Amino acid sequence: MNLLRNRSYKASMLSTFVVAIMATFSFTASYQSGADLISGTVMVNTVFNTVAVNGALTSTLLCVSIMAMVRFCRKVGEEADASTNRWSWFVGLITAATLTLPLFSPEGSTILFTTARVLPALPESEKTCWYWLFMVIRFLGFLLFLVNVLRALLVVIGGTREGHLIQPVGSRLADDLRSTLKVMANKHIWPCFERCQVLFKTFSARSVVILGAVISAAWVPWIVLLYPANIAADTVAQLVWARGDMPVWDPSSREDIPWARMSDHHPWMDTVLYGWFDRLGLAMGNEGAGLYIFAVLQTVVCAGAVAMLVCYLGGRLGVDWRLCAAGAAWYSIVPVFGRLAMVIVKDATFIPLFLVWITVFMEYVRRIRHSEKIGFTLPALLIGVALMCGLTRKVGLYVIVAAMVILLVIVRRRLVSLVCVALISGLSVGISAIAFPALRIAPAGQQESLAIPLQQTANLLIEHGSDLSASDQSAIARVVVCDAKQSRELFSLTGSDPIKDHCFNRRASRGDVARFLVVWAKQGLLHPRTYISAVPWVRNPFVMGSIYDEGFYVRWGWSDRGGLSILPQYAEGQRSVPQKYGALLYYMLAKLPVMGLLMSENLYVVWIPLLSVVLAIIRRRARNLVYVVPLLITIPLLVISPAYQTRYSWALAYGFFAFIALPWIGQRHDGNNDGESISAQA
């Protein structure tokens, strides 16, 4: 028996060592170009040089640390049941892929401030068998390491029985670990928040205002360091239109629209709002002051919306106040939240409205699930806030309508949900029908919603144009006016703008577009690699790479269309004095351990949602997924982005705590948390 135990121990230590070696390779190995992977001998020499670039001591310490961590995680998770093992492998496969797949970047470019080593992009012709071997080994190293960590995590946090406080399964070591962490938290962490717990146990105007003020105070450094404005090209165009000094133009075709006062290429409500504060600043004799007032108000309102979400989850949905306190601290400390709220752009203006709508949506779901009276106010809020979301960011309206349709299918009170869907859709169309002629708004073109099909079709014409049938070529030609040669000249792997702006036939009818989409779908089945290779940027939100960053500058863009008249004292892309210090601080924090990871886009797009959904399933709380349907819908929509910008996923970053709380929603109702049940609170 001792001999068997000894052999088992040796085998376990050997496998732990192998995992540590492979993980060390995965975290450190890289290459400089395709020439490093032309043969096995060259690959061994060049790739292992990157492992040793920081010296043998650094890699040794990393390997020993990983080995100790894997050994500890194996002890914690040694009694994991079959279900926990399966889920750890499932999550491990996906998260390992996000670490292995490279962030797309044009050849020769360098991406700074990333959370994981970004491998140089290689053309298909340079991806040899040694390249794929390197990638497979890298993936396996990440996978084996993550599976061990995830198994331990799921054992510590996972659950068993429904209807009671979930008691995690696992070994004695896991129980000891939980007890130790609980004692440490109760002794050193939670006493600091003890007096504040009432904020997270009650959902009231007072608790929201107080918590919102605390979060706003934590964001003050970014409020100061972004002075006087942070304005990119989209907003510059809107400000120029709002002033009325220059002819309005279509940002896609670049053609003037003499009769219009603005274009719905960007939401007209944002144009009106930004223009009002710009004029306020001009009337005050300081244009920057007017725009800065707007940015500060937007940030304070955003802090209030975050506070509303956190307080609601604790006060209405029964999430433990300690978790809510940790979430509020996360929002306050991680710099992306305060920094991004100060950007004057439609995506930032949309965020507080969307957070409020999600909170109202959760309350609507909660009342349905607990058979409580819906009333008039709640549906009115659902409709009213949804319209405001749609007027500030068009995609937001699509997300909201889709979420309500899904709710219509899977929960009760379908008549109320149906009325909400009908009114949101109808009023949105009606408001636009009234506002467009009254404000002389030029409608946006169809090309924006067809960006991905147009880009992929252009690549299809380049690679397989001569193989297409006459009918398919005819259907494509009615919508795409560029031939293969013109498409090749315009084609870009960084975004679809050149193709959609210059190759779309703006006179195409709806029937033409419908027939084009049928051909596009058919050819996609025949040439999937052509379509995938045409849009490499769509993977970027789903791989561990970029941090959330909109750059530090006062304004840039449309200098030939009046953009230089906006805050003319600043040059194109120039930083103000506070922004110089802000950039230094922000990028320094992005390079730090832990903080850099917490500033990563992929953490909020993949890791947190995935792990939270799995934990909810393990803890027998899969029914709670309905609360985060709007956020879940947002994730796949990132695949249809016309180019890669981290601001497209801001909604997931600001709504991350809804995912974090997902496995614990209803815990107070189970009678295992302080306070009364959810139904009693209502």
Image (cartoon, grey):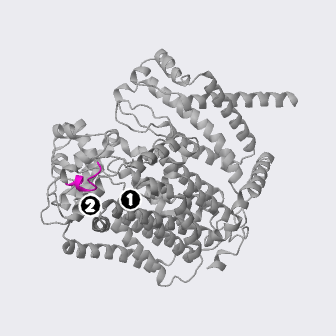
Residue type beneath disc 1: Asp
Q: Residue furthest left?
A: 258
Residue type beneath disc 2: Leu
Does the segment drawn in magenta span residue 326? no
Q: Position of residue 43 (x, y in %)?
A: 48, 19
Decide if residue 27 is in sight here.
yes
Q: Quadrant of the N terminus?
A: top right
Q: Position of residue 670 (x, y in %)?
A: 70, 69
Q: Residue at x 39, y 50 (%)?
A: 639
Q: Quadrant of the C terminus?
A: bottom right
Secondary structure at numbered mark 2: helix
Q: Residue at x 58, y 43 (%)?
A: 92
* Depth order, front residue of 145/465: 145
Residue 678's place in the image compared with 346, above or below, is below
Q: Position of residue 591 (x, y in %)?
A: 52, 40
Which range of residues does the magenta coloring cover? Answer: 562-570
Q: Residues within 10 Å of mark 1 (few under 14, many from 20)?
A: many
Secondary structure at numbered mark 1: helix
Sequence-wise, the earlier of marks 2 and 1 is 2
Label 2: which residue? 239
Label 1: which residue? 347
Q: Is residue 519 left or right of residue 210?
A: left
Asked if the residues shown at circle 2 and circle 1 are in contact, with their CB atoms under 8 angstroms apart, the answer is: no
Q: Is residue 89 left or right of residue 433?
A: right
Q: Residues within 10 Å of mark 2 (few under 14, many from 20)?
A: many
Does the segment drawn in magenta span residue 566? yes
